[in-house]
Every structure is written in structure tokens, then in C-alpha cells.
Image: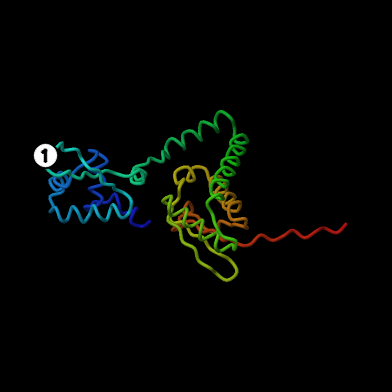
């Protein structure tokens, strides 16, 4: 997914995506005129974008005269690049809920949100072994734009996130971090501990993941 993170930069490919988002379907000549590069260079960029599933080709109607002309437009996958995650809206809604309903109600609601997220992720995570599940979960996070990395350290698995999906909200309300930790534990069926957090100035958020320890029966 690394190519997706670069798709909206100022490279020719990124510029093509912006042009198609702004103007709709365009032909080779239209793109050449806007970008100031050759037809061959435009076709090469389009081929790369089509291979990534970001652009699709259609055939423009030309009646009975001349050959049909291809036009290019964004796929649904590419439109996700322009999604707005509305952090300001989420932060203001959270603050209004706190003011109107109080922290106890918000705490319960946050727990329910975490449960819902866990249920969604569990449907996608694969693997019988814990490490397989953590790797699968990391791939899902990557697909959602959360750059993640998994490493094995002695008797624990470390899951590192390099960007936060709730950055502004978590910066103001650290209980969001606890919700994320609890959600991960439910998804992975494991013990999860947040050992470093970017809200404390670290480069990313680091979670240690261990197999669940079964509770020993108490003596009667």
C-alpha cells in the first residue's frame, strides 16, 4: 500500500489523480496539455495507476467517424484517497457529549464503539496462531492508512503504529488510547499493553502483545 500514500504528491501520477478528481474523465491529449509531458509519458503513468487499481479506462462515443477514443477516470478505490476523516467534527462532537451527558455516559458509549470496531476487525483478521493474527491485523491497518509494523521480541510480539487514526481526539482525550488498546485485545484474543504513545512524544505507538494467561482456579 505504500504507493497509495504517494498517490497525491506532486508526481505526474499524483497530478493525474487530482486532475481526474477535479475534471472527471479525460483523454490522453487532455492530460498531456495539462501536465506538459509527452503522450508516451502520460500513457506510462496511466498504466501504473491502472495497475494499482486507481484509474480505469472507458471508451468515448464518436459516432461513425474515426476510431473510438479512450478516456480515463478514477476508480472507487482512488476516491478513498480524498476521504475526509473529519477529526474536527469528531472532537467537537465528543466535547459536546461530555458537556451534555457527562463522563460516565461517554465512557459507556466509548466502550460500545470499541466493541463495534473489534467486531468489524475480527471479521477480517485471519490466523490460528497469535503472530499470524497480529500480522493480519497489521495488514488491515495498513490498508486503512495506518502505517504499521510487527516484530518479535523474546516472548512478546510488538505492534508499532507510526500514525494515529484519532490523533486530534486522542491528544485531547487520552481515554481514546485505552479504547484502542482494549479493542486490539478483543480482536487478537490476547493481552495487549500500550508501552509507548506518540501523545507522549514518541515516534509512534507501540503495543506489546502476549497470549492470554488463563486464570488459575481459586482454592475452595
Q: Give whichever of 173, 55 is nearer the camera.
A: 55
Q: Is residue 189 above or below residue 117?
A: below
Relative to 214, residue 199 above or below: above
Left or right of residue 109, residue 171 in this image: left
The one nearer the camera, 31 or 104, is 31
Q: Residue 130's image quarter?
A: bottom right
Residue drawn at the location 41% of the way across and 51% of the way down = 145
Residue in view at x 56 percent, y 28 percent: 100
Observer-nearest residue: 197 or 166? Answer: 166
Q: How would you rate the neighbour count of disc 1 (Cα within 10 Å): few for under 14, some for 14-19, many for 20 or more?
A: few
Image quadrant occupied by the N terminus: bottom left
Residue drawn at point x = 24 percent, y = 38 percent = 24
Under circle 1, the secondary element is loop
- Measured from the top left, where is residue 10 in percent x and y? 23, 51
| Whole-percent x, y for residue 45 in the image | 22, 54
> Which residue is label 1 attached to?
65
Farthest residue to the top: give it: 100
Q: Which residue lies furthest to the front in this view?
A: 64
Work out whether residue 139 or residue 211 is closer to the camera in this orientation and state it.
139
The quarter of the picture where the C terminus appears is: bottom right
In the rendered structure, the answer to whether residue 70 lies left or right of residue 215 reads left
The colouring scheme, among rainbow, by chain, secondary structure or one colour, is rainbow
| Callout count | 1
The residue at the far bottom in this view is: 154
| Residue 172, horizontal then vertical, whole percent | 49, 42
Q: In this view, does 3 lie to the left or right of 148?
A: left
User: Residue 167, image x and y in percent?
Assistant: 45, 46
Amino acid at each position: 500500500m505504500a504507493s497509495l500514500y504517494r498517490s497525491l504528491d506532486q508526481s505526474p501520477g499524483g497530478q493525474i489523480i487530482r486532475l481526474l478528481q477535479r475534471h472527471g474523465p479525460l483523454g490522453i491529449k487532455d492530460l498531456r496539455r495539462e501536465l506538459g509531458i509527452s503522450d508516451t509519458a502520460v500513457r506510462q503513468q496511466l498504466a501504473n495507476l491502472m495497475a494499482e487499481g486507481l484509474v480505469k479506462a472507458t471508451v468515448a462515443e464518436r459516432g461513425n467517424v474515426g476510431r473510438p477514443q479512450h478516456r480515463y477516470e478514477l476508480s472507487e478505490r482512488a476516491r478513498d484517497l480524498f476521504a475526509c476523516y473529519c477529526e474536527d467534527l469528531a472532537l467537537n462532537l465528543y466535547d459536546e457529549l461530555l458537556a451534555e451527558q457527562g463522563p460516565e455516559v461517554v465512557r459507556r458509549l466509548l466502550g460500545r464503539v470499541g466493541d463495534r470496531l473489534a467486531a468489524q476487525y475480527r471479521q477480517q483478521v485471519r490466523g490460528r496462531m497469535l503472530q499470524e493474527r497480529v500480522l493480519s491485523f497489521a495488514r488491515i491497518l495498513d490498508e486503512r492508512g495506518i502505517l504499521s509494523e510487527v516484530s518479535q521480541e523474546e516472548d512478546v510480539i510488538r505492534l508499532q503504529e507510526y500514525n494515529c487514526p484519532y490523533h486530534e481526539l486522542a491528544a485531547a482525550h487520552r481515554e481514546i488510547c485505552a479504547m484502542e488498546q482494549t479493542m486490539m485485545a478483543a480482536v487478537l484474543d490476547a493481552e495487549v499493553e500500550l508501552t509507548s504513545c506518540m501523545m507522549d512524544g514518541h515516534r509512534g505507538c507501540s503495543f506489546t502483545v502476549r497470549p492470554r494467561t488463563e486464570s488459575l482456579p481459586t482454592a475452595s
